[in-house]
Amino acid sequence: MKILIYILVLFSFSNFFSPLKKYTKTEMVMGTVLSVTAFHTQGGEKLLNELFQLAESYEQLFSSRREDGVIFGINKNSSGILKDDKISDLINQSLYYAVLTDGAFDPGLYRVISLWDIESKQIIPKIEDIAFAMKESGYKNVIVNGEHLQLLHNAGLDLGAIAKGRIIGLLADFLKEKGCYDFLINAGGDLIASGLYDKKREWNIAIADPYNKNETIGFIKLSDKSIVTSGDYERYFIGDDGKRYHHIIDPVTGYPVDNGLNSVTVISDNPTEADALSTAFFVMGIDRALKLAEKLTGVEAVFIKKDEHDEIQIITTQGIIMKPQTGNGFEFGIK
Ligand code: FAD
Ligand code: MG
């Protein structure tokens, strides 16, 4: 017995002292690049393989595009039974953010979003088709009663502006359950920075330059935070009229948001909140978004636009510090 205890103690000490190794994996999931860096003692490859399998299963659960998915079925039948807690929870959260943002974040825009289908069509829909799709849209048409969901007026659900945040949150929970606490998950601009880089320093996160995709506006050091960016510079096309048509729709007009904003980054402890609010703030514009952000606890934001002289303007919530760095944009921080 003594020997067994001795061996167990030795084993746990050797595990404790075994050096952390850096593991990375990148693959396309949810139509975007999912990239994970994790510091773990051993078995990190297997852990990340399992994480990516999990990500694919969540993609199927939350996607409105996959014909084998739950949301696709709900949209087809205008109703559904929400058997999976993860689905009902996310739909309820999306309705919560719709109310909180006075409809700027709207999970009931599926008909308008699929009419635009920015990724593949790249054509401005006819005005009458937009008007028709708008009649079949809006979160007020999404009725949840326990596990019963009903969609009125042929509305459809699209959780594209919130599900990536929820999914990275679930993936972070998975890593922590497996004893891995120091990691960075990045799903196409939705990030969670957990613990530290190599147990030494906070994660250094770049904020992209919306006017030059290969450049950055600056960096922010974070630990145990989510940071999510919504912008008009990744998914868009230029119309015959020379205007930029991107994927964030104004639920009032049915057209891509046109308020001068090019990028909104939100920092929060909660990745689902950061994702929903980054889209909502983009729709709301700076003044309305700042008012709401200042009312919420633990939510900070960085807004990027150009002024009438084509100069870049960066506006932040009060909790953000912004210091210019020579030749390296800005260093952002949380007060
Ligand atoms: P966000 O600002 O977070 O979201 C913008 C997206 O939300 C739009 O693309 C639209 O779908 C929706 N939206 C637009 N306006 C509003 C609004 N006012 N309120 C609420 N929602 C709005 N893309 C593919 O090309 N192929 C795929 O197979 C694919 N599968 C996906 C599966 C899942 C589970 C998810 C979550 C997304 C998938 N995507 C796919 C979508 C893709 O990755 C999106 O670009 C992404 O979800 C949008 O995130 P974002 O961070 O770019 O912008
Ligand atoms: Mg979003």
Image: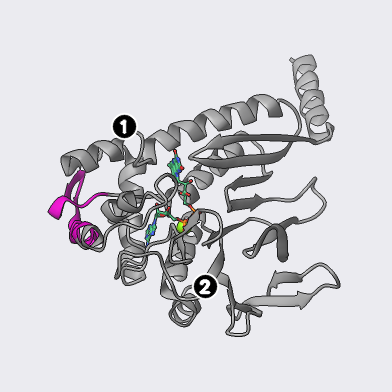
Give whichever of 119, 71 is nearer the camera: 119
In magenta segment, residue 61? no
Q: Say which mark, if any, is on residue 328.
A: none
Give x and y (percent) for residue 19: 84, 34
Residue 204 falls in image quadrant: bottom right
Identity, as a three-letter code, of the amino acid under mark 1: Glu
Identity, as a three-letter code, of the amino acid under mark 2: Leu
Badge 2, how many Cα within 10 Å: few under 14, some, many 20+? Answer: many
- Give the position of the N terminus as an image quadrant: top right
Residue 147 falls in image quadrant: top left
Residue 259 left/right relative to 73: right
Give x and y (percent) for residue 252: 29, 70
Residue 91 left/right relative to 4: left
Give whichever of 257, 120 is nearer the camera: 120
Label 1: which residue?
67
Looking at the rendering, the stretch of residues picked out in magenta corresponds to 132-156
Reply above or below: 69 against 159. above
Residue 72 falls in image quadrant: top left
Q: Secondary structure at mark 2?
A: strand
Residue 19 left/right relative to 221: right
Give x and y (percent) for residue 226: 58, 57
Label 2: which residue?
261
Q: CA distance from mark 1 to mark 2?
A: 34 Å
Reply above or below: 271 against 308. above
The answer to whether one can see residue 81 in this image is: no
The residue positioned 63% from the left and 84% from the top of the image is 309
The answer to whether one can see residue 139 in this image is: yes
The residue positioned 62% from the left and 45% from the top of the image is 185
